[in-house]
Amino acid sequence: MEVLQLLASPITEICKWAITPLGRQIGYLVHYKRNVEKLKKKVEDLRNTRAELQQKVDAARRNLESIRRVIEVWIERVDMETIGDENMVRLMNGEAIEMINHQCFKGWCSCFTCYSIGRKAQKKMFIVSELLNDGRSFGDVVADPSAPLASIEFVPTIYDFEDFTSRESVMNQVMEALKDEETYLFGVYGMGGVGKTMLMNHVRKRVLEEKLFDAVVITTVSQNVDLKRIQGEIAYKLGFTKLQNVDDIPTRAAMLSARLMQESKILVILDDLWSAMDLSLSDIGIPYRETHPHKCCKVVITTRSLDVCSWMNTQRHIEVRFLSEEDSWHLFKKSVGDVVDSTTLETMAREVARECGGLPIALVTLGKALRNKDKLVWDDTILQLRKSDYTYIDGMDHKVISSIKLSYDYLGNEIIRKCFLLCCLFPEDYRISLDELMMYVMGDDDILEDLETLKQVRGRLHTVFHKLIASSLLLGYKENDAGISYVWMHDIVRDVAISITSKEGKGFFVKAGGGLRNWPDRGIRLLSHNSTSKCLRLSLMENEISVLPEQPELPHLLSLSLEGNISLKELPDKFFESMKALATLDLSRTGISSLPSSLSFLLNLHTLNLDDCNFDQSIDISQIGELKKLEILSLHNCKLQKLPKEFGRLTNLKLLDLSDNVQLDIIPPNMISKLSRLEELNMKNSFTSWEVEGWGNGKEGGFKDEEESDAITLFSKLRVIILRYLSNLETIWKGVIPVLGCLENLKVLNVVGCDKLRYLFSMDMARRCLQQLENSTSASTSTTPPQTIFRVLFPQLSILHLFGLTNLTSFHQTGGSSVYSWPSLQDLIVPRCEKLKRLPLTHQSAPQLRRITGDSDEWFQDLEWESPSVMLHLQPLFQS
């Protein structure tokens, strides 16, 4: 019995050992379907766990945290087991069960196949269960405490945007730049309140809808650049919270850059950028093409200043202009409500909308201010708009005026600010030429500083114009490459400028184009008696004033403009006696026929404009000669018959405009020659019998007589000579010029429509040019063969314009082959000079020459040339 028990125990164990695996193997065969279903459930649980863990990983990565290596390995294993294993894929998609069912349907079920599937499912279940347990054990901590840093972006609220027709062009330009792979940085600029931010928010919405970028971030830069705030806003929008724990700006920039480079396609919009000098993309932490050619962001900046785009080296710059009248009306109507549909208010509403000049911020602000208001309020609002006074219009001061004033404040340079404010002296929509503004700066030492010539003044003002246009404070028109033809102010900007002069005590009284019929005595007195400012600038242009006060007390007045007051027929005799500080006086296009004796009191006057005044034939304007500081005297179309000899006292005069005085035939001898600082003389269509005498026989119209000894000063500063439609002019210079330096600064000689003119230079003048140069070079040419060298006649002359000179045969009286040296000549313009047979040019005589303009190629080829090679050399420069 004991023996049997001893044998039974191991036999039992052997049977257990044999039967258990056998049962397991049989289970694979019998329960293969159940095993597959259990596996599916386990895998589903594993996938859910992986998804939850992946969310935590993504959040950590957005925060630039480093992921624990064990978690990264776990995710890789899960993906390998659930996605990368072909057997698992077949089990999970039901392909294996389908194969068994298909075989059984055909009558031969394979026990081995069922067994194999059941066994594989069971083994996979163990692996999946292990991964599932590991995944659940990780908890919420997925980041490694020691992790590197990165970068981020910010997006503001999207405001309502209207798809205006007048915005289509700029929108298309922006979208084109965004889609261009080669454009990674471009600028959008325009006046404050024109709708740049609104446009960019619409761009953000559209690019996300079209899936052009994976992420779009907008952040506001503003005037006071705060890098930490900008970085923080970008980081917040990207969910990059780790940046909050770092204070060092360069470290934050490095973190932000790393974060941004994680995105495959990202758009960063930097809104309201005022200066590029205090900001760079690398300072913020934005990777750009130069530093990260393969992982850079596309960046758009919005700014009020075109100069900012230039400083940022944008590849493109796109201007946001004003709304069209139709779009303006639509936006205003939307803001003000249906009340404008009434016949009573619609006309007024359209006038208000027009006053806004297409500026969205003004349209919306005025619309809301007038919403649900009655007709009386509308009437008063229109009156305020006409007076450029927004005191009683809700929102206009702190929204519209303050917005545009920011651009003025940011100009920085006081000279540019002064010039900007001077532009508000002109009426609404007035096209301001550079010369018109120049009249108002003459005598202002703060603006002129050390500028000596009119060319320098124009150059400075041209720079100012460019700056103001680039800052969206002026609008400009450029006719050609020569420069800006004129500028003008947007109506709202002009109103802001007037508001600034009032609030900052600049002493401006501006009622230009206001329809005034009477002298605004009360307003001027209020300003003049103000404790903080005096009346310094008085602009009454384009009004209907007919009577002036006898002697207004304006001792501090610097400029007075009565231009365009056609109803004004006379000036009281004592009118100027209390204006002794006056520097600029504009009486052009008034109806005055004489000048008051008090004009001689204006000893500080630098500019006097009398254009288009219908003076009596007997008028005595000799008192102008007492104005010793006068620098600009404009007498265009004044019906003058003669000039007084007293004009010779104007030794500081730089510009004298006598154009279109067709009856002017007497200029006293020596008068003009005494104007030693004269730079520009305009004689267009005036004094048709006049000829410029050098030092020949004296006659009326002569410039110099033999008794004068300071010949070297004659026209030493003259830069421009314009002679147009002088029907009796036969020669410009008569006789010999003893000192060639007298015209050394002449830059432009413009002669048009002088039918009797046969040559430009006299025989003696041409001989003297050659003789002087030959004498000066004889010593240095003793060892070289004789050669013809010609004197530099006008060393600074850059433009020689001869048009319609039908009898001009030669440049000098003798004709022949003489040529001159033109070291500065760039443009030689000689159309409709049919009898001109020879140009005074050789291969090297005009090294700066860019262009020769004539009638036709045939005319050019028919000219007489020193040699065929000269024609071939100059032909590429010719244009008809």
Image (cartoon, rainbow, N blue to C red):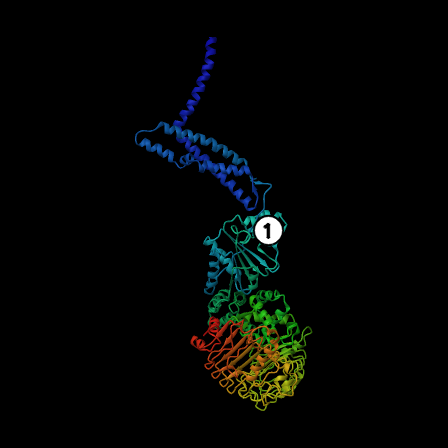
Q: Residue furthest right?
A: 531
In the rendered image, the vertical position of residue 668 relative to residue 275, given as above or below: below
Judging depth in this view, the residue of 778 and 261 nearest the camera is: 778
Q: Residue at x 45, y 19 (%)?
A: 16
Residue 610: quarter of image: bottom right
Callout count:
1
Left or right relative to 491: residue 533: right
User: Residue 816, position in %: x, y?
Assistant: 50, 81
Look at label 1 and name its amino acid.
Answer: Ala
User: Is the C terminus in the top left, top right, bottom left or bottom right quadrant?
Assistant: bottom left
User: Residue 227, position in %: x, y?
Assistant: 61, 54
Q: Residue at x 45, y 37 (%)?
A: 82
Judging depth in this view, the residue of 16 and 467 nearest the camera is: 467
In the rendered image, the vertical position of residue 112 relative to residue 617, given as above or below: above
Residue 607: quarter of image: bottom right
User: Residue 732, position in %: x, y?
Assistant: 55, 84
Q: Residue furthest left?
A: 106
Judging depth in this view, the residue of 680 and 148 nearest the camera is: 680
Q: Residues within 10 Å of mark 1 (few under 14, many from 20)?
A: many
Left or right relative to 698: residue 872: left
- Pointer 1: what residue? 253
User: Residue 756, position in %: x, y?
Assistant: 50, 86
In the rendered image, the vertical position of residue 717 relative to residue 53, given as above or below: below
**Residue 574 visible (yes or no):** no
**Residue 803 visible (yes or no):** yes
Q: In terms of secondary structure, where does tag 1 sit?
A: helix
